[in-house]
Image (cartoon, grey):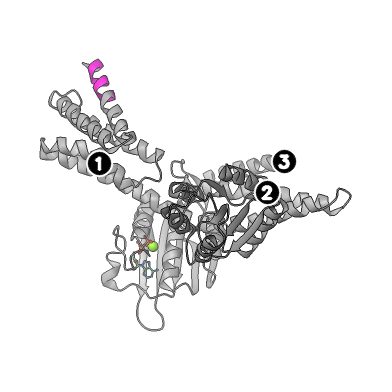
Amino acid sequence: MPGLHVTTEQRYSTLLQQVIFAPNLNAREEFLAEAFELGRGALSQDAIPPDELVAIHHNAILCFSQKNPDMKLCDVVDLLTLPLIEMSMAYGMSFREQLEKQYRALLDKRLQESHRLEAVGTLAAGIAHEFNNLLCSIIGFSELAFEGLSDEEPAKESIQQVLVASLRARDLVSTMLQLARKNSGLPSEEIDLISEINSVIKLVDVREKKLEINFSSGVPNAFITAKPGQIQQIILNLCINAADAMEHCGTIDINIESTTSDECLTGVGESAICITISDQGTGIPPEVQEQIFNPFFTTKEPGKGTGLGLSVVHRMVEDLGGRILVESRTTGGNNGTDFRIILPFVDKDKRGTSCQKKCSLYKAHNHGG
Amino acid sequence: MAHILVIDDEFQIRQLVTRMLETDGHMVTTASNGAEGLRLFQQERPDLIITDLIMPELEGLEVINRIKKNNDNVPILAMSGGGHHCRRDVILHVSELFGAKAVLPKPFTRSELMQAIVVALS
Ligand SMILES: Nc1ncnc2c1ncn2[C@@H]1O[C@H](COP(=O)(O)OP(=O)(O)OP(=O)(O)O)[C@@H](O)[C@H]1O
Ligand SMILES: [Mg+2]
Protein backbone atom coordinates (compact mmCIF):
# COMPACT_ATOMS: atom_id res chain seq x y z
CA MET A 1 0.00 0.00 0.00
CA PRO A 2 2.24 2.76 -1.21
CA GLY A 3 -0.35 5.49 -0.57
CA LEU A 4 -0.69 4.77 3.13
CA HIS A 5 3.00 4.25 3.31
CA VAL A 6 3.73 7.81 2.25
CA THR A 7 1.23 9.37 4.60
CA THR A 8 2.52 7.48 7.64
CA GLU A 9 6.01 8.64 6.80
CA GLN A 10 4.86 12.17 6.32
CA ARG A 11 2.91 12.14 9.56
CA TYR A 12 5.91 10.76 11.32
CA SER A 13 8.30 13.36 9.98
CA THR A 14 5.80 16.13 10.76
CA LEU A 15 5.70 14.88 14.33
CA LEU A 16 9.46 15.12 14.52
CA GLN A 17 9.29 18.72 13.38
CA GLN A 18 6.69 19.44 16.00
CA VAL A 19 8.99 17.98 18.60
CA ILE A 20 11.71 20.46 17.76
CA PHE A 21 9.50 23.48 17.40
CA ALA A 22 7.30 22.65 20.37
CA PRO A 23 6.54 25.84 22.29
CA ASN A 24 7.11 24.25 25.68
CA LEU A 25 8.36 21.11 27.36
CA ASN A 26 4.93 19.58 27.89
CA ALA A 27 4.00 19.89 24.26
CA ARG A 28 7.36 18.45 23.32
CA GLU A 29 6.83 15.39 25.52
CA GLU A 30 3.42 14.86 23.98
CA PHE A 31 4.77 14.99 20.44
CA LEU A 32 7.58 12.63 21.41
CA ALA A 33 5.12 10.16 22.86
CA GLU A 34 2.92 10.44 19.79
CA ALA A 35 5.91 9.88 17.50
CA PHE A 36 6.85 6.83 19.51
CA GLU A 37 3.34 5.37 19.27
CA LEU A 38 3.04 6.06 15.56
CA GLY A 39 6.51 4.70 14.88
CA ARG A 40 5.95 1.55 16.85
CA GLY A 41 2.63 0.87 15.15
CA ALA A 42 4.10 1.56 11.75
CA LEU A 43 7.05 -0.70 12.39
CA SER A 44 5.01 -3.62 13.60
CA GLN A 45 2.69 -3.36 10.59
CA ASP A 46 5.63 -2.82 8.27
CA ALA A 47 4.07 0.49 7.19
CA ILE A 48 7.51 2.07 7.31
CA PRO A 49 10.51 -0.15 6.71
CA PRO A 50 13.22 0.33 9.37
CA ASP A 51 15.62 1.72 6.78
CA GLU A 52 13.27 4.48 5.88
CA LEU A 53 12.47 5.29 9.46
CA VAL A 54 16.17 5.83 9.97
CA ALA A 55 16.32 7.94 6.84
CA ILE A 56 13.49 10.14 8.10
CA HIS A 57 15.39 10.76 11.32
CA HIS A 58 18.53 11.33 9.38
CA ASN A 59 16.84 14.02 7.29
CA ALA A 60 15.09 15.54 10.26
CA ILE A 61 18.37 15.89 12.13
CA LEU A 62 20.16 17.41 9.16
CA CYS A 63 17.28 19.76 8.49
CA PHE A 64 17.00 20.94 12.07
CA SER A 65 20.67 21.33 12.64
CA GLN A 66 20.91 23.40 9.47
CA LYS A 67 18.00 25.56 10.52
CA ASN A 68 19.38 25.93 14.03
CA PRO A 69 23.13 26.18 13.56
CA ASP A 70 23.53 27.42 17.10
CA MET A 71 21.70 24.54 18.72
CA LYS A 72 24.09 21.92 20.05
CA LEU A 73 24.21 18.96 17.71
CA CYS A 74 24.17 16.39 20.48
CA ASP A 75 20.97 17.95 21.81
CA VAL A 76 19.29 17.70 18.42
CA VAL A 77 20.40 14.11 17.99
CA ASP A 78 19.38 13.15 21.53
CA LEU A 79 15.97 14.67 21.17
CA LEU A 80 15.15 13.27 17.78
CA THR A 81 16.45 9.79 18.36
CA LEU A 82 14.54 9.32 21.58
CA PRO A 83 11.43 7.77 20.00
CA LEU A 84 13.61 5.65 17.75
CA ILE A 85 15.67 4.33 20.60
CA GLU A 86 12.56 3.43 22.56
CA MET A 87 11.12 1.69 19.53
CA SER A 88 14.28 -0.16 18.76
CA MET A 89 14.32 -1.61 22.26
CA ALA A 90 11.45 -3.74 21.12
CA TYR A 91 13.21 -4.88 18.00
CA GLY A 92 16.17 -7.00 17.07
CA MET A 93 19.80 -6.40 17.74
CA SER A 94 20.66 -5.94 14.08
CA PHE A 95 18.29 -3.01 13.70
CA ARG A 96 19.81 -1.39 16.73
CA GLU A 97 23.32 -1.86 15.37
CA GLN A 98 22.30 -0.45 12.04
CA LEU A 99 20.86 2.59 13.80
CA GLU A 100 23.96 3.14 15.81
CA LYS A 101 26.14 2.94 12.73
CA GLN A 102 24.07 5.44 10.81
CA TYR A 103 24.02 7.92 13.65
CA ARG A 104 27.70 7.51 14.29
CA ALA A 105 28.38 8.34 10.62
CA LEU A 106 26.10 11.34 10.74
CA LEU A 107 27.60 12.59 13.94
CA ASP A 108 31.12 12.17 12.57
CA LYS A 109 30.22 14.18 9.52
CA ARG A 110 28.86 17.03 11.59
CA LEU A 111 31.77 16.98 13.97
CA GLN A 112 34.14 17.10 11.04
CA GLU A 113 32.27 20.06 9.66
CA SER A 114 32.13 21.89 12.93
CA HIS A 115 35.82 21.32 13.35
CA ARG A 116 36.54 22.67 9.91
CA LEU A 117 34.53 25.72 10.80
CA GLU A 118 36.49 26.01 13.96
CA ALA A 119 39.86 25.92 12.23
CA VAL A 120 39.09 28.22 9.31
CA GLY A 121 36.45 30.15 11.16
CA THR A 122 38.57 30.88 14.21
CA LEU A 123 41.25 32.50 12.13
CA ALA A 124 38.84 34.29 9.83
CA ALA A 125 36.78 35.48 12.77
CA GLY A 126 39.88 36.62 14.61
CA ILE A 127 40.86 38.78 11.68
CA ALA A 128 37.31 39.94 11.12
CA HIS A 129 37.05 41.03 14.72
CA GLU A 130 40.11 43.22 14.47
CA PHE A 131 39.07 44.53 11.07
CA ASN A 132 35.61 45.34 12.35
CA ASN A 133 37.00 47.48 15.12
CA LEU A 134 39.44 49.25 12.82
CA LEU A 135 36.78 49.82 10.20
CA CYS A 136 34.47 51.18 12.84
CA SER A 137 36.95 53.97 13.54
CA ILE A 138 37.71 54.60 9.87
CA ILE A 139 34.06 54.82 8.89
CA GLY A 140 32.97 56.81 11.93
CA PHE A 141 35.76 59.36 11.99
CA SER A 142 35.59 59.98 8.26
CA GLU A 143 31.87 60.59 8.60
CA LEU A 144 32.51 63.10 11.37
CA ALA A 145 35.25 64.78 9.34
CA PHE A 146 33.00 64.85 6.27
CA GLU A 147 30.22 66.55 8.16
CA GLY A 148 32.62 69.04 9.70
CA LEU A 149 33.83 70.33 6.34
CA SER A 150 32.08 72.95 4.24
CA ASP A 151 31.27 72.07 0.65
CA GLU A 152 34.01 74.32 -0.74
CA GLU A 153 36.76 72.38 1.01
CA PRO A 154 38.67 70.22 -1.50
CA ALA A 155 39.35 67.67 1.25
CA LYS A 156 35.66 66.93 1.49
CA GLU A 157 35.63 64.87 -1.68
CA SER A 158 38.73 62.95 -0.61
CA ILE A 159 37.11 62.01 2.66
CA GLN A 160 34.04 60.85 0.83
CA GLN A 161 36.28 58.49 -1.14
CA VAL A 162 37.71 57.10 2.10
CA LEU A 163 34.18 56.55 3.34
CA VAL A 164 33.06 54.70 0.22
CA ALA A 165 36.15 52.49 0.30
CA SER A 166 35.73 51.64 3.97
CA LEU A 167 32.09 50.72 3.47
CA ARG A 168 33.17 48.37 0.70
CA ALA A 169 35.76 46.86 3.02
CA ARG A 170 32.99 46.26 5.53
CA ASP A 171 31.06 44.23 2.94
CA LEU A 172 34.19 42.31 2.09
CA VAL A 173 34.77 41.24 5.67
CA SER A 174 31.25 39.92 6.04
CA THR A 175 31.53 38.04 2.73
CA MET A 176 34.76 36.47 3.94
CA LEU A 177 33.06 35.26 7.10
CA GLN A 178 30.20 33.78 5.14
CA LEU A 179 32.66 31.93 2.93
CA ALA A 180 34.47 30.52 5.92
CA ARG A 181 31.16 29.19 7.16
CA LYS A 182 29.87 27.33 4.15
CA ASN A 183 32.08 25.74 1.60
CA SER A 184 31.51 22.10 2.37
CA GLY A 185 28.92 21.09 -0.21
CA LEU A 186 30.90 22.44 -3.14
CA PRO A 187 32.06 20.15 -5.95
CA SER A 188 35.71 19.31 -6.42
CA GLU A 189 37.78 21.39 -8.78
CA GLU A 190 41.35 21.80 -9.85
CA ILE A 191 43.17 23.78 -7.26
CA ASP A 192 46.63 25.32 -7.25
CA LEU A 193 48.39 24.15 -4.11
CA ILE A 194 50.80 27.07 -4.17
CA SER A 195 48.16 29.75 -3.99
CA GLU A 196 46.14 27.77 -1.43
CA ILE A 197 49.16 27.44 0.83
CA ASN A 198 49.99 31.11 0.42
CA SER A 199 46.51 32.08 1.51
CA VAL A 200 46.77 29.93 4.65
CA ILE A 201 50.15 31.45 5.49
CA LYS A 202 48.57 34.90 5.38
CA LEU A 203 45.87 33.78 7.80
CA VAL A 204 48.34 32.21 10.21
CA ASP A 205 50.68 35.22 10.04
CA VAL A 206 48.04 37.54 11.39
CA ARG A 207 47.41 35.36 14.42
CA GLU A 208 50.87 34.03 15.17
CA LYS A 209 53.00 37.11 15.44
CA LYS A 210 56.14 35.40 16.77
CA LEU A 211 56.03 32.61 14.24
CA GLU A 212 57.81 32.54 10.93
CA ILE A 213 56.68 30.43 8.01
CA ASN A 214 59.11 29.58 5.22
CA PHE A 215 57.44 28.33 2.11
CA SER A 216 59.38 26.95 -0.82
CA SER A 217 58.25 25.14 -3.91
CA GLY A 218 60.30 22.92 -6.18
CA VAL A 219 57.65 23.12 -8.90
CA PRO A 220 56.28 26.19 -10.72
CA ASN A 221 52.68 25.15 -10.21
CA ALA A 222 50.96 22.22 -8.61
CA PHE A 223 47.39 21.44 -9.52
CA ILE A 224 45.42 18.85 -7.61
CA THR A 225 41.72 17.99 -7.45
CA ALA A 226 40.01 19.00 -4.23
CA LYS A 227 37.05 20.82 -2.81
CA PRO A 228 37.49 24.52 -2.17
CA GLY A 229 38.73 24.99 1.36
CA GLN A 230 39.91 21.40 1.81
CA ILE A 231 43.59 22.09 1.28
CA GLN A 232 43.41 25.20 3.41
CA GLN A 233 41.92 23.24 6.23
CA ILE A 234 44.53 20.52 6.04
CA ILE A 235 47.43 22.97 6.02
CA LEU A 236 45.81 25.14 8.66
CA ASN A 237 45.33 22.25 11.10
CA LEU A 238 48.94 21.14 10.62
CA CYS A 239 50.22 24.70 11.08
CA ILE A 240 48.17 25.20 14.24
CA ASN A 241 49.55 21.94 15.66
CA ALA A 242 53.10 22.96 14.72
CA ALA A 243 52.60 26.37 16.32
CA ASP A 244 51.27 24.72 19.50
CA ALA A 245 54.24 22.35 19.61
CA MET A 246 56.65 25.29 19.41
CA GLU A 247 54.73 27.39 21.91
CA HIS A 248 53.92 29.85 19.16
CA CYS A 249 57.49 30.91 18.60
CA GLY A 250 59.87 29.57 15.94
CA THR A 251 59.83 28.59 12.29
CA ILE A 252 57.54 26.33 10.30
CA ASP A 253 58.95 25.10 6.99
CA ILE A 254 56.54 24.22 4.24
CA ASN A 255 57.86 22.67 1.09
CA ILE A 256 56.22 21.19 -1.98
CA GLU A 257 57.88 18.94 -4.51
CA SER A 258 56.90 16.42 -7.10
CA THR A 259 57.86 12.99 -5.89
CA THR A 260 58.86 9.69 -7.42
CA SER A 261 60.02 7.89 -4.29
CA ASP A 262 58.50 4.44 -3.92
CA GLU A 263 57.72 4.87 -0.27
CA CYS A 264 55.58 7.88 -1.02
CA LEU A 265 53.85 6.63 -4.10
CA THR A 266 52.40 3.41 -2.71
CA GLY A 267 48.73 3.61 -3.39
CA VAL A 268 48.76 7.14 -4.76
CA GLY A 269 49.58 6.68 -8.42
CA GLU A 270 52.41 7.34 -10.78
CA SER A 271 52.93 11.01 -10.35
CA ALA A 272 52.35 12.71 -7.06
CA ILE A 273 53.06 15.87 -5.21
CA CYS A 274 54.51 15.92 -1.72
CA ILE A 275 53.82 18.67 0.81
CA THR A 276 56.12 18.68 3.83
CA ILE A 277 55.34 20.71 6.93
CA SER A 278 58.16 20.72 9.47
CA ASP A 279 58.44 22.25 12.89
CA GLN A 280 61.12 22.34 15.60
CA GLY A 281 58.66 21.70 18.38
CA THR A 282 58.52 19.13 21.14
CA GLY A 283 58.23 16.19 18.77
CA ILE A 284 55.86 13.25 19.24
CA PRO A 285 57.00 10.23 21.32
CA PRO A 286 56.53 6.87 19.52
CA GLU A 287 53.79 5.65 21.87
CA VAL A 288 51.83 8.85 21.21
CA GLN A 289 52.47 8.73 17.48
CA GLU A 290 50.33 5.61 17.16
CA GLN A 291 47.31 7.50 18.41
CA ILE A 292 47.52 10.97 16.94
CA PHE A 293 45.08 10.28 14.11
CA ASN A 294 42.42 8.89 16.42
CA PRO A 295 39.41 11.14 16.86
CA PHE A 296 39.40 12.88 20.24
CA PHE A 297 43.01 11.95 20.99
CA THR A 298 44.75 15.00 22.40
CA THR A 299 47.57 15.76 24.79
CA LYS A 300 46.44 19.34 25.16
CA GLU A 301 44.70 20.85 28.15
CA PRO A 302 40.91 20.86 28.16
CA GLY A 303 39.73 23.81 26.13
CA LYS A 304 42.95 23.95 24.11
CA GLY A 305 42.38 20.98 21.84
CA THR A 306 39.53 18.70 20.87
CA GLY A 307 41.76 16.04 19.35
CA LEU A 308 39.88 16.19 16.08
CA GLY A 309 42.37 18.14 13.97
CA LEU A 310 44.49 15.28 12.71
CA SER A 311 41.59 12.86 12.34
CA VAL A 312 39.92 15.36 10.03
CA VAL A 313 43.19 15.90 8.14
CA HIS A 314 43.63 12.15 7.80
CA ARG A 315 40.17 11.63 6.42
CA MET A 316 40.47 14.49 3.97
CA VAL A 317 43.80 13.29 2.65
CA GLU A 318 42.24 9.86 2.14
CA ASP A 319 39.28 11.44 0.37
CA LEU A 320 41.74 13.09 -1.97
CA GLY A 321 43.32 9.73 -2.75
CA GLY A 322 46.50 10.61 -0.90
CA ARG A 323 48.54 9.54 2.09
CA ILE A 324 49.96 11.18 5.17
CA LEU A 325 53.28 10.24 6.81
CA VAL A 326 54.79 11.39 10.12
CA GLU A 327 58.40 11.56 11.19
CA SER A 328 59.26 12.94 14.58
CA ARG A 329 62.31 13.45 16.80
CA THR A 330 61.91 14.02 20.53
CA THR A 331 65.53 14.00 21.65
CA GLY A 332 68.67 16.05 21.11
CA GLY A 333 68.74 19.57 19.82
CA ASN A 334 67.23 18.22 16.64
CA ASN A 335 63.71 17.67 17.95
CA GLY A 336 60.70 18.42 15.81
CA THR A 337 58.09 16.88 13.54
CA ASP A 338 57.65 16.48 9.78
CA PHE A 339 54.23 15.78 8.34
CA ARG A 340 54.30 14.69 4.71
CA ILE A 341 51.19 14.67 2.59
CA ILE A 342 51.30 12.95 -0.77
CA LEU A 343 48.55 13.79 -3.22
CA PRO A 344 47.95 12.66 -6.79
CA PHE A 345 48.85 15.19 -9.48
CA VAL A 346 46.22 16.35 -11.94
CA ASP A 347 46.68 14.96 -15.43
CA LYS A 348 48.97 17.20 -17.50
CA ASP A 349 46.72 17.79 -20.53
CA LYS A 350 43.67 18.42 -18.40
CA ARG A 351 45.65 20.87 -16.35
CA GLY A 352 46.40 22.99 -19.43
CA THR A 353 42.78 23.48 -20.44
CA SER A 354 41.54 24.25 -16.96
CA CYS A 355 44.19 26.90 -16.52
CA GLN A 356 43.23 28.49 -19.79
CA LYS A 357 39.62 28.52 -18.74
CA LYS A 358 40.51 30.19 -15.48
CA CYS A 359 42.65 32.81 -17.20
CA SER A 360 39.93 33.80 -19.63
CA LEU A 361 37.38 33.94 -16.84
CA TYR A 362 39.69 36.17 -14.91
CA LYS A 363 40.13 38.48 -17.89
CA ALA A 364 36.41 38.68 -18.49
CA HIS A 365 35.95 39.56 -14.86
CA ASN A 366 38.57 42.28 -14.94
CA HIS A 367 37.14 43.89 -18.05
CA GLY A 368 33.73 43.88 -16.48
CA GLY A 369 34.67 45.65 -13.28
CA MET B 1 18.61 64.87 25.42
CA ALA B 2 19.84 61.78 27.20
CA HIS B 3 22.68 60.93 29.55
CA ILE B 4 24.48 57.95 28.03
CA LEU B 5 27.12 55.64 29.51
CA VAL B 6 29.46 54.18 26.89
CA ILE B 7 31.49 51.06 27.80
CA ASP B 8 34.19 49.85 25.39
CA ASP B 9 37.74 48.67 25.94
CA GLU B 10 38.98 50.40 22.77
CA PHE B 11 39.90 54.01 23.27
CA GLN B 12 39.20 54.93 19.64
CA ILE B 13 35.70 53.51 19.76
CA ARG B 14 34.92 55.34 23.00
CA GLN B 15 36.13 58.56 21.43
CA LEU B 16 34.19 57.97 18.24
CA VAL B 17 30.89 57.16 19.93
CA THR B 18 31.34 60.10 22.32
CA ARG B 19 31.90 62.51 19.46
CA MET B 20 28.89 61.19 17.55
CA LEU B 21 26.64 61.39 20.60
CA GLU B 22 27.83 64.81 21.71
CA THR B 23 27.29 66.21 18.22
CA ASP B 24 23.71 65.07 18.66
CA GLY B 25 23.43 66.88 21.99
CA HIS B 26 23.66 63.93 24.37
CA MET B 27 25.68 63.90 27.57
CA VAL B 28 28.28 61.12 27.66
CA THR B 29 30.20 59.23 30.35
CA THR B 30 32.71 56.56 29.31
CA ALA B 31 34.17 53.45 30.92
CA SER B 32 36.95 51.24 29.58
CA ASN B 33 35.80 47.96 31.09
CA GLY B 34 32.73 46.30 32.53
CA ALA B 35 33.63 46.76 36.19
CA GLU B 36 34.21 50.48 35.77
CA GLY B 37 30.99 50.64 33.75
CA LEU B 38 28.94 49.07 36.54
CA ARG B 39 30.44 51.45 39.09
CA LEU B 40 29.68 54.50 36.95
CA PHE B 41 26.19 53.19 36.32
CA GLN B 42 25.47 53.06 40.07
CA GLN B 43 26.97 56.53 40.58
CA GLU B 44 25.47 58.42 37.68
CA ARG B 45 22.26 56.57 36.81
CA PRO B 46 22.38 57.30 33.05
CA ASP B 47 19.29 57.01 30.80
CA LEU B 48 20.98 54.54 28.46
CA ILE B 49 23.98 52.21 28.46
CA ILE B 50 25.85 51.44 25.25
CA THR B 51 28.23 48.54 25.84
CA ASP B 52 30.70 46.50 23.85
CA LEU B 53 30.27 42.76 24.46
CA ILE B 54 33.73 41.25 24.34
CA MET B 55 36.09 42.96 26.75
CA PRO B 56 38.88 41.86 29.06
CA GLU B 57 38.17 42.07 32.81
CA LEU B 58 34.38 42.02 32.76
CA GLU B 59 32.46 41.01 29.65
CA GLY B 60 29.59 43.09 28.34
CA LEU B 61 27.26 40.11 28.66
CA GLU B 62 28.06 39.95 32.35
CA VAL B 63 27.39 43.68 32.69
CA ILE B 64 23.96 43.24 31.13
CA ASN B 65 23.33 40.18 33.25
CA ARG B 66 24.15 41.93 36.52
CA ILE B 67 22.11 45.00 35.70
CA LYS B 68 19.07 42.97 34.68
CA LYS B 69 19.38 40.65 37.69
CA ASN B 70 19.14 43.76 39.83
CA ASN B 71 15.84 44.56 38.15
CA ASP B 72 17.22 47.79 36.79
CA ASN B 73 15.25 48.68 33.72
CA VAL B 74 17.76 51.04 32.18
CA PRO B 75 17.75 50.33 28.41
CA ILE B 76 20.95 48.74 27.09
CA LEU B 77 22.31 48.90 23.56
CA ALA B 78 24.81 46.09 22.89
CA MET B 79 27.44 46.45 20.18
CA SER B 80 29.99 43.96 18.91
CA GLY B 81 32.33 43.21 16.05
CA GLY B 82 32.44 39.52 16.97
CA GLY B 83 35.38 37.76 18.52
CA HIS B 84 37.91 35.01 17.99
CA HIS B 85 35.56 32.41 19.33
CA CYS B 86 32.13 33.72 18.61
CA ARG B 87 30.24 35.02 15.66
CA ARG B 88 29.00 38.57 15.72
CA ASP B 89 25.36 37.73 15.01
CA VAL B 90 25.36 34.99 17.63
CA ILE B 91 26.76 37.06 20.45
CA LEU B 92 24.45 39.95 19.60
CA HIS B 93 21.50 37.61 19.69
CA VAL B 94 22.63 36.22 23.02
CA SER B 95 22.88 39.75 24.41
CA GLU B 96 19.23 40.29 23.49
CA LEU B 97 18.34 37.15 25.42
CA PHE B 98 20.23 38.59 28.37
CA GLY B 99 18.12 41.72 28.15
CA ALA B 100 19.74 44.18 25.72
CA LYS B 101 16.99 46.27 24.17
CA ALA B 102 18.81 46.98 20.92
CA VAL B 103 21.91 45.66 19.17
CA LEU B 104 24.42 47.22 16.81
CA PRO B 105 26.95 45.25 14.76
CA LYS B 106 30.38 46.86 14.38
CA PRO B 107 31.42 48.54 12.17
CA PHE B 108 28.47 50.93 12.06
CA THR B 109 27.75 54.23 10.38
CA ARG B 110 26.57 57.24 12.27
CA SER B 111 22.99 56.84 11.13
CA GLU B 112 22.98 53.17 12.18
CA LEU B 113 24.10 54.21 15.65
CA MET B 114 21.39 56.86 15.85
CA GLN B 115 18.70 54.41 14.73
CA ALA B 116 19.79 51.87 17.32
CA ILE B 117 19.62 54.55 20.02
CA VAL B 118 16.09 55.46 18.96
CA VAL B 119 15.09 51.78 19.28
CA ALA B 120 16.78 51.46 22.66
CA LEU B 121 15.13 54.59 24.04
CA SER B 122 11.68 53.87 22.62
N1 LIG C 1 53.44 19.08 15.12
C1 LIG C 1 53.22 18.40 16.26
N2 LIG C 1 54.16 18.34 17.23
C2 LIG C 1 53.95 17.67 18.38
N3 LIG C 1 52.81 17.00 18.66
C3 LIG C 1 51.84 17.02 17.76
C4 LIG C 1 51.97 17.72 16.51
N4 LIG C 1 50.83 17.55 15.81
C5 LIG C 1 50.02 16.80 16.57
N5 LIG C 1 50.60 16.48 17.74
C6 LIG C 1 50.03 15.65 18.81
O1 LIG C 1 48.89 14.98 18.30
C7 LIG C 1 47.75 15.25 19.11
C8 LIG C 1 46.50 15.22 18.26
O2 LIG C 1 46.50 16.31 17.34
P1 LIG C 1 45.13 16.83 16.76
O3 LIG C 1 45.41 17.93 15.81
O4 LIG C 1 44.34 15.66 16.25
O5 LIG C 1 44.37 17.37 18.03
P2 LIG C 1 44.71 18.64 18.92
O6 LIG C 1 45.64 19.55 18.21
O7 LIG C 1 45.11 18.16 20.26
O8 LIG C 1 43.28 19.34 19.03
P3 LIG C 1 42.52 20.13 17.86
O9 LIG C 1 43.32 20.03 16.61
O10 LIG C 1 41.21 19.44 17.76
O11 LIG C 1 42.40 21.52 18.36
C9 LIG C 1 48.06 16.58 19.76
O12 LIG C 1 47.36 16.77 20.96
C10 LIG C 1 49.56 16.48 19.98
O13 LIG C 1 49.86 15.73 21.13
MG1 LIG D 1 45.27 20.20 16.19
Secondary element under disc 3, as helix, strand or loop, is helix
* Image mark for residue B110: 2
Quadrant of res A209: bottom right
- Residue B105 covered by magenta stretch: no
Give the side of residue B34 with respect to residue A110, left or right.
right
- Residue A9 covered by magenta stretch: yes
* Residue B34 higher or lower than B71, as above or below: below
Quadrant for ligand 1 reads bottom left
Q: Residues within 10 Å of mark 2 (few under 14, many from 20)?
A: some
Quarter of the picture containing the C terminus of chain A is top right
Chain letter, disc 1 residue: A
Q: Are marks 3 and 1 on the same chain?
A: yes
Residue to which mark 3 is pinned: A367
Q: Amino acid at mark 1?
A: Gln
Q: Amino acid at mark 3?
A: His
| Span highlighted in magenta in the image | A3-10
* Image mark for residue A102: 1
